[in-house]
Image (cartoon, rainbow, N blue to C red):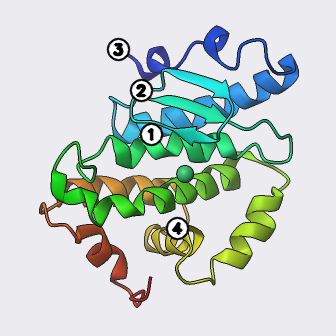
Amino acid sequence: MVNEEKLLPKDKFLSGEVPSCLIDELYELYKKVHLFLLQLNNKIKVVSVERGGPDWDNSGAVKITIDTDDKGVVFHEVGHALLANSVFHRNHNPINAKRNEAWGEAVAEAIRWLMENEYIKPQSKWSKEDFERQKEQKGTNIYKANIILSKCGYTLEGFKKMWLELVSEFDNTADYLDRQFSQGGFTEF
Ligand SMILES: [Zn+2]
């Protein structure tokens, strides 16, 4: 099955609750991020995108807030599907529940940054201000996201290569992602 056929059909995307021009725009952004994730794991599913949250659950049900100045939320919430469907989630191995899974928010933020950098012009407030400020604040998910982005060179291609390597070299240890991302001088989370 080609990846386009795995996307949520447009008539099931935010149906009826949002101005149609905004639905059109958000659907295009959703397609970009889901198609990117399918290159990393062709089983990633999104079963619904509704207004609310924002949040995401393991079944692939996504909720997004509707804000014309914050469209990147869709990248973040759909981006959660990557780690949640990976070898780093407790569904794959219960040891992940302790530390590897704790990278889930940072992975979603890193995906958001990469997708916004490519597809949202001019830069959003999140990317221009929130990200820039919090990337220096140790302990925040954006700080951790910036560690991931540094490791992959701030590019979608770099992220793809990095992720596929991380997955293929996973040694089933609880602190695998901590150790991988601590290389290169980033030791304080
Ligand atoms: Zn999140």
Front one among 50 and 133 = 50
Q: What residue type is labelled 3?
A: Met
Measure how far apart labels 3 and 1 are at the Cα level: 15 Å
* Residue hosting label 1: 37
The first of marks 3 and 2 along the sequence is: 3
Q: Of circles 3 and 2, which is in front?
A: 2
Picture mark count = 4
* Residue hosting label 2: 45
In the image, is the residue at mark 2 within 8 Å of ligand 1 by its beta carbon?
no
Who's the residue at 45% across and 29% down the image?
A: 60
Q: What element carries label 2?
A: loop
| Quadrant into which the N terminus falls | top left
Q: Which mark is residue 1?
A: 3
Q: Is mark 1 on a helix, strand or loop?
A: helix
Measure how far apart labels 4 and 2 are at the Cα level: 23 Å
Q: What element carries label 3?
A: loop
Quick one: label 2, few (<14), some, or many (20+) residues within 10 Å?
A: many
* Residue hosting label 4: 145
The first of marks 1 and 4 along the sequence is: 1
Measure how far apart labels 1 and 4 are at the Cα level: 17 Å
Q: Of circles 1 and 2, which is in front?
A: 2
